[in-house]
């Protein structure tokens, strides 16, 4: 078996290199072959995955959600399976798949794993595998990217989050789901295919990554007090019953605004409004541990 590891050396976790070396040693002992490529910047993982897809059996993405998304993009035409060694800060995709930063877990997934198919979301043609956001959280991501100098941890989010909390002006948004008006007013919006967001928040709690649907949650919001109220209810998993919150499952979403508003996708910058979301059902094949059950 030929395994190609595509590694993001600036992802959040610092022990990925050690784990990858252990996985390589275990593969070598049974006659399998692991090669490693390091990314140098945005888009590298996509180009590397597309280039090697014809010559390997499986790609191992080593990094965070952004790295996994880029590798999945590169494999979109080949349908080659993708395994994940979580090395980022949140690792939403890996958590959903039940993959751990553990060499034995990764080795067993590569050598005896099973295939799990997942939908892929798109925003303005850009693919994502977990959650995209418009407004507040996208501005946090913008500030984090501007300040990032290497590996990041949850602590690195503190100042971007605090500054956004103090200065953000919630844009007026118009949200259509399957061409039907869902909401119009000041808000923040989340669109995705997985239930979990950062720090375990289950914003899109009805989402399933293989049902062919996008989940949309609209929080009407124009003040810090409202934001704190939404955050508290989300932590308690009561946000879907909160007054004004809209939750919808659909296949397409359009978001427009007369004001400037940015977009994030899987924790990376994804441009500005207007945004057009759609979904590609079961577009990626993940290789997961043979006994661990992907979480819901």
Image (cartoon, rainbow, N blue to C red):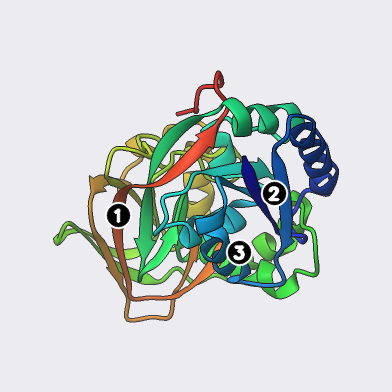
Where does the image place residue 188, in percent across and percent down from the top left? 41, 60
Q: Position of residue 76 (x, y in %)?
A: 41, 57
| Residue 79 location (% of width, % of height) | 41, 50
Determine the image quadrant of residue 43. bottom right
How far apart are the alpha carbons under marks 1 and 3? 22 Å
Q: Nearer the viewer, mark 2 or mark 3?
A: 3
Q: Which mark is residue 89?
A: 2
Circles 2 and 3: CB atoms closer than 8 Å? no
Q: Which residue is mark 1?
A: 279
Q: Residues within 10 Å of mark 3 (few under 14, many from 20)?
A: many
Which image quadrant for residue 273? bottom left
Image check: 120 left or right of 84? left
Mark toward the start of the polypeptide (2 vs 1):
2
Q: Quadrant of the C terminus?
A: top left
Q: Which residue is mark 3?
A: 45
What residue do we see at 49% from left, 40% from top? Answer: 286
Local secondary structure at mark 2: loop
Q: Depth check: give the residue in front, 285 or 214.
A: 285
Residue 102, visible in the rendered structure: no
Above or below, comparing residue 38 to residue 203 in the picture: below
Return the disc, 1 or 3, that comes first in the chain's sequence: 3
Q: Nearer the viewer, residue 76 or 240?
A: 76
| Marks 2, 1: nearer the viewer | 1
Q: In the rendered view of the protein, which quadrant contains the N terminus?
A: top right
Which residue appears farthest toward the top when viewing the image? 291
Disc 2 to disc 1, C-alpha distance: 25 Å
């Amino acid at each position: 078996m030929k395994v190609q590891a595509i590694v993001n050396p600036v992802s959040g976790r610092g022990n990925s290199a050690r784990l990858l070396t252990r996985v390589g040693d275990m593969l070598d002992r049974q006659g399998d072959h692991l090669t490693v490529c390091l990314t140098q910047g945005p888009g590298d993982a996509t180009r590397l995955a597309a280039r090697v897809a014809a010559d390997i059996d499986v790609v191992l993405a080593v990094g965070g959600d952004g790295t996994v998304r880029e590798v999945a993009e590169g494999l979109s035409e080949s349908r080659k399976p993708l395994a994940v060694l979580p090395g980022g800060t949140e690792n939403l995709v890996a958590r959903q798949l039940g993959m751990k930063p553990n060499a034995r877990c990764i080795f067993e997934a590569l050598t005896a794993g099973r295939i799990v198919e997942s939908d892929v979301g798109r925003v303005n043609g850009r693919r994502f595998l977990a959650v995209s956001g418009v407004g507040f959280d996208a501005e946090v991501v913008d500030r984090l990217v501007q300040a990032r100098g290497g590996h990041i941890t949850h602590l690195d989010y503190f100042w971007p989050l605090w500054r956004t909390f103090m200065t953000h002006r919630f844009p007026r948004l118009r949200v259509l789901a399957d061409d039907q008006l869902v909401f119009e007013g000041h808000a923040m919006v989340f669109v995705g295919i997985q239930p979990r967001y950062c720090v375990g928040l289950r914003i899109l709690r009805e989402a399933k990554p293989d049902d062919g649907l996008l989940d949309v949650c609209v929080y009407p919001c124009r003040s810090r007090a409202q934001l704190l109220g939404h955050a508290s209810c989300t932590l308690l998993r009561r946000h879907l019953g909160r007054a004004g919150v809209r939750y919808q499952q659909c296949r397409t979403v359009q978001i427009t605004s007369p004001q400037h508003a940015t977009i994030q996708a899987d924790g990376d910058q994804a441009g500005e409004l207007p945004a057009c979301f759609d979904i590609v059902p079961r577009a990626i094949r993940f290789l997961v541990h043979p006994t661990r059950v992907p979480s819901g």
